[in-house]
Image (spheres, rainbow, N blue to C red):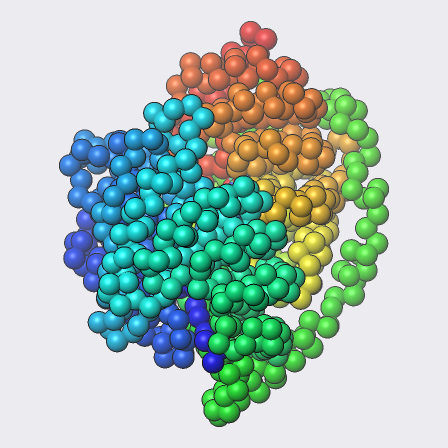
Amino acid sequence: MVLSSVLGFPRIGANREIKKAVEAYWAGKLTQEELTKAAADVKKTSWTSIQQRGVDLIPSGEFSLYDHVLDHSAAFNVIPKRYVGLGLSPIDVYFAMGRGRQADGVDVPACEMKKWFDSNYHFVVPEVSEETEFKLNFNKALEEYQEAKAAGVTTRPVILGPVSFLVLSKAAKGASAGFQPISVLSKLLPVYETLLTDLKAAGVESVQIDEPILVLDTAAALEKQYVSVYETLAPIAPKIVLTTYFSRLDSNVSFIAKLPIAGLHIDLDRAPGQLEEVIAAVKPTSIVLSLGVVSGRNIWKTDFAAAIKTGQTAIDALGADRVIIATSSSLLHTPVTLASEKKLTAEQKDWFSFALEKASEVSVIASALSGSQDAAVTGALEANKVSIAKRREFESTSDDTVRKRVASITPEMLERKSPFAVRKEVQAKHLNLPKFPTTTIGSFPQTKEIRQARAKLGKGEITVEEYDEFIKKEIETVVRFQERIGLDLLVHGEPERNDMVQYFGEQLSGFVFTQNAWVQSYGSRYVRPPIIVSDVSRPGPMTVRWSSYAQSITKKPMKGMLTGPVTILNWSFPRADVSRELQSKQLALALRDEVVDLEKAGINAIQVDEPAIREGLPLRRSDWDAYLKWAVDSFKLSTAGVTDQLQTHSHFCYSDFDDIFPSIQRLDADVISIEASKSDMKLLNTFKQYGYSNQIGPGVYDIHSPRVPGDQEIKDRLKSMLDILPDSLLFVNPDCGLKTRGWKETEASLVNLVAGATWARQNY
Ligand code: GLN
Ligand code: ZN
């Protein structure tokens, strides 16, 4: 019989119960018992509803109040010294590591956070050194297994595997130079032995061990570690199902298939092409193959007929008892349930499947492959056939104008009229900016008043005219402020934007929005990505009225502000029927028209933000070039339609450029602004070493904290930047937008920033 499985479930609750409970606990409005109770309720609802959907292998242990990697760190005693001895309870140590703590005389920053592979989920990076004393503080997998059991649900516990845990870790402060966390694997292993021995003793039949790093090129060098870990664990553990996701195993499969594991899970949503190779590798063994055919990363209904065909291929080779039908990854990256959406049309609703609906999908596909004649199953197959046919029909009605435009993109459309050296001269005359021009990244504080005005507009409590008047006033305040403190290149402050992607999605055709489709980004921060459902085009100008209003009230140059095509794509749920490249180019053409319109309206500098361009990099290096080609081309397409005198800017929220440097140069933006980090002098050296030729504004202070940088600090920073960069290329700006900051620290910081630039003009 073919079994069905779900690899992990959203932990936020259908109505964001966990966000509310966790934030109330932080605010001192909920006790730890009440928080535990709120978590127990959400877990129980998830387990029982997945069970009701007919799923055989139900996950437990992957629930989290903040982040599942942080849960492992806390359980394994991987707690940096700075959080120890502060007099905090274990749960407060846990939250302090996740988000920092500044109260009652305790002042510790949070641990570093990183993107979870190529998703928009962030995990808290474990810190390991030779001195880390691994021990099992608690066995979360066992506790949740028993909790589920008490609720009448038998589950398959989920844990993050030891090799992935250490590869995702970083060297703790105080570790010796060149220390690699993986080098302490043999010290960590006994913790897993205890954990798994206890699970087996409790009657757990099989356990899901996630080893996502097996889809990376770097895993090829870890064969020895994998063999030793799994040879140690297999004899004492419940049956081990080794789980991989987000990309393909490639040659790693040859050693994986020899590991003493009971099952292997592969992602056939992201990497359908690996099926044959993996089947061939596991065929001579007794390994059960778990087929990730229901997407854990997107929200489209699964095509049952196609999934059944894939399943049948595996059954023909391995037999039904050696095949599991599963979600491609944890469903953490999808919203909880479609049932919460009241505003989608019936047609739209029929296209999608969220986490709970996906649980039904794996169950139906597995039953069908087991030959079930149950009326519920045949009915579901029939209904799916109808839905998929309707969606396919909708997909076939493309927007011919947009398609033709994409097909006729020429290489010339990607290039500015003249090279940077020429443009720089023209722009210097036209914009008349001083040496070391000062500017900001776009947004100014999104105050309570701004959010309230937007909410009132949504509820119909104020008219559109009243709202527009309000926004104009906000813009005027921001413009006058910038004039007063002496900034050179102004912005309008983005008060009209709810979110840098949603704002554009709402004005483009081809997008659909949800009411409740929240997905965890990190901790208690959730996002609600728009969904691209059809060809994208721009019915009319999107930002021109606000930018030109802002320009009309000042003599200083105003910078227009847009979100780039790759970022809009990466922070939305994309279509699955056409390539990401096509969607990105369609977005780029829409933005190109906006850029041209802004120039016509008298705007002389335009920033097109691309903070997500790096996040979209494929996990396998061999796929990088293809991605970078269309991603960079999309940016160029959106910005190159202007005259030489228009100064293009771009902004990135990260600074690890080393391995994609040529692509950053190829963007050919006149000015880029980048994150400030401890390593930015190293970064600037990289720019110098590669001979980066265009202008650059490395953030002179970190906006992610309310701390005000002193003016000496800014001068020192500029000084070290000028030791490396030519004077004529340096812009002076903060390292990101100011929307999350308050006015008080914004004003103080920017005054010091202007003072720094003035000082530089006198001294260089
Ligand atoms: N222009 C945007 C802002 O200032 C950029 C935000 C970002 O890079 N994430 O808010
Ligand atoms: Zn940024």
Residue 472, percent from left and from top:
52, 44
The answer to whether residue 614 is above or below residue 334 is: above
Which image quadrant for residue 763? top right
Q: What residue do we see at 34% from left, 63% from top? A: 238
Residue 414, percent from left and from top:
78, 42
Q: What residue do we see at 23% from left, 51% from top? A: 138
The front one of 294 and 384 is: 294
Q: Is residue 306 visible?
A: yes
The front one of 196 and 103 is: 196
Residue 573, percent from left and from top:
56, 60
Residue 736, percent from left and from top:
50, 35
Q: Is residue 465 visible?
A: no
The answer to whether residue 507 is above or below residue 321 is: above
Q: What residue do we see at 30% from left, 46% from top? A: 190
Residue sticking out furthest to the top: 763
The answer to whether residue 751 is above or below residue 304 is: above
Horizontal arrangement in the rendering, residue 174 relative to residue 285 (left or right): left
Q: What residue do we see at 71% from left, 47% from top? A: 626
Which image quadrant for residue 45? bottom left
